[in-house]
Amino acid sequence: MCAFALKLLRSITKCLPQLLSGLMMSSHLFDSTIVALATPPGTGAVAVVRLSGPSAWAIAAKLFAPTSGEAFSPWQAQHGVLHTDNTSDDGNDALLDEVLALSFKAPKSFTGEDVVEFHLHGSPYIAQRVLAACVAAGATMAGKGEFSQRAFINGRLDLSQAESILELLNASGDKVLDAATNNLRHQTLATHINGLCETLIHIQSQIVASVDFPDEVDEPDRHSLLKELENLDTRLQALEASAQASQVIRGGIRVALLGRPNAGKSSLFNRLLASERAIVTDIAGTTRDTVEEPLMIEGIPVTLVDTAGLRHDTVDAVESIGIDRSWQAAKGAYAALYLVDSSQGLSDDDNAALATLAKDYPQLPVQIVSTHADIADTTIPNSMAVSSVTGQGIADVVAVLSQWVQQAMATGAQQETLQQQLCLSQRQHQCVIIARVALAQTVEALANPLSPLDLATVPLTDVLRQLDAMVGRDTTEDVLTAVFSQFCVGK
Ligand SMILES: Nc1nc2c(ncn2[C@@H]2O[C@H](COP(=O)(O)OP(=O)(O)OP(=O)(O)O)[C@@H](O)[C@H]2O)c(=O)[nH]1
Ligand SMILES: [Mg+2]
């Protein structure tokens, strides 16, 4: 019994640093009070200066005089004036602006600290002076992302929510906006990861308990552990697929418009975008450089790339460079539309270009489009008839683009719900990849009956660490709790 207690103590001390850092994280508050402009720089209707930290109110009280004459108080929007801090300098308290002050009391604020926001008139000059006054009154200028970082450290956001804020700020389409908002409001990713971690902790605790306390706990059945790990890998695989879909949600896909000169590429490009973005003339070789523009399809940006017409017989050096770029565009695209002027029919150049596409880019989906449908009476085989003049067939082209978007995202049919909810950053994608490698190593260690059970705990801890890193937390103490929960009451 005494040896057992000693072992238990040793196990606890092993995990003590993590436990302590966990505790410190949860109760830690920063000493400094930070300030920054919370709105974009430049002129606007309103500029917001945000103060956060233990002295936020004290600093605000030095600078702000409410119109009502009442004291500066929390949980209110107060109208008043801002002036420089007259308590600290020569009594020269210059008027800065007429403002609205919003105050929040810790921990119920974005950062979890005391926060004051001044809503000023949106002049960069006024904002600059207010920031300087805040610094003179004791605040320090905030670093990049420091407000979100404090929110994270004070437990107001998990890391995936902090990353969702970044997504929101950079959002380029409705889909990414939906996913980021969803994660921010409902912690969808964290909830999903928590489920995976619970399973991992359960497996880990069975192994750790039987290795550390062989007299008390039986060795778990390797077969059932392997089954659980297999199941876990399927779930990680789904997460990886969802990360791939996230990349499409975030960055969209590129579609190149290829074809011979005068095929009607720029006309279709303009028609799809509903703008005269590219130059259209009846001179063969009008487009010299690639021109690209995003088109929103079901909330996902599809970047259309208009290219220089492909032909062999050009002697023009500039056009020739343009043609090289057209092939580069094909290389960088997810898919291509190959346009043929159906009033002219399919030429040898078209056949050669289509053969090159099939040979050099076998993965590239290519849809042939018969343009000039309004004046032609034949259609090229396996193509869709389109007229950029009348709009005939444009909806069919959009349907194909939409199909490609779905295809790029559909890395597994069962992933649909996951894709709608989760939006993984590249960092999180990397974590999933590394976690899967570590999981494979765990399986390898367990599958070998000659290898000792505790060999599996090292890679298994790595899997857990990667998943924790995705949401930015440390669950070593959770393993400990799960280990102890396996003992009967009173031990
Ligand atoms: N009637 C008709 N004319 C079209 C259609 N599409 C394009 N055109 C005309 O065909 C000519 C060439 O069109 P562009 O869109 O410039 O062709 P392109 O493929 O971009 O040509 P390059 O830039 O030279 O490679 C222009 O005079 C267009 O007005 C169409 O669907 N119907
Ligand atoms: Mg063109």
Image (cartoon, grey):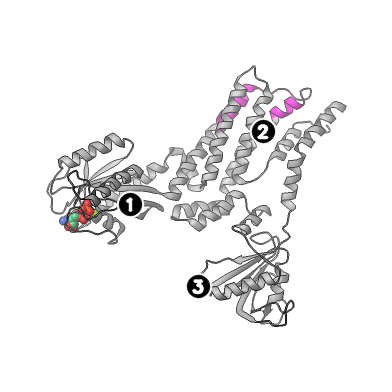
Q: What is the spatial separation of the Cα atoms under label 3 and label 1, in whole angstroms?
A: 33 Å
- Precedes in sequence: disc 2 or disc 3: 3
Is label 1 or label 2 in front? 1
Quadrant in which the N terminus appears? top right
User: Disc 1 on helix, strand or loop?
Assistant: strand
Q: Which residue is mark 1?
A: 304
Relative horizontal placement of residue 1, taking residue 251 as reference (left or right): right
Q: Name the amino acid, label 2.
A: His
| Label 2 beta carbon less than 8 Å to ligand 2 | no
> Given the current orientation, which residue lies at the most extreme right position?
2
Q: Quadrant of residue 209?
A: top right
Q: Residues within 10 Å of mark 1 (few under 14, many from 20)?
A: many
Q: Relative to the observer, which residue lies in front, 191 or 89?
A: 89
Is label 2 or label 3 in front? 3
Ligand 2, what quadrant? Answer: bottom left
Q: Is residue 145 above or below residue 352?
A: below
Q: Which mark is residue 44?
A: 3
Residue 63 placement (x, y as % from top left) = 68, 76
Residue 230 is one of the magenta-drawn residues? yes
Q: Which residue is mark 2?
A: 202
Can residue 76 be seen in the rendering of this structure? no
Q: What is the spatial separation of the Cα atoms under label 2 and label 3, in whole angstroms?
A: 54 Å
Q: Name the amino acid, label 1.
A: Leu
Residue 124 is one of the magenta-drawn residues? no
Residue 122 placement (x, y as % from top left) = 53, 74
Q: Which residues are magenta?
A: 206-232
Q: Is residue 1 above or below residue 48?
A: above
Q: Are marks 3 and 1 in contact (CB under 8 Å)?
A: no
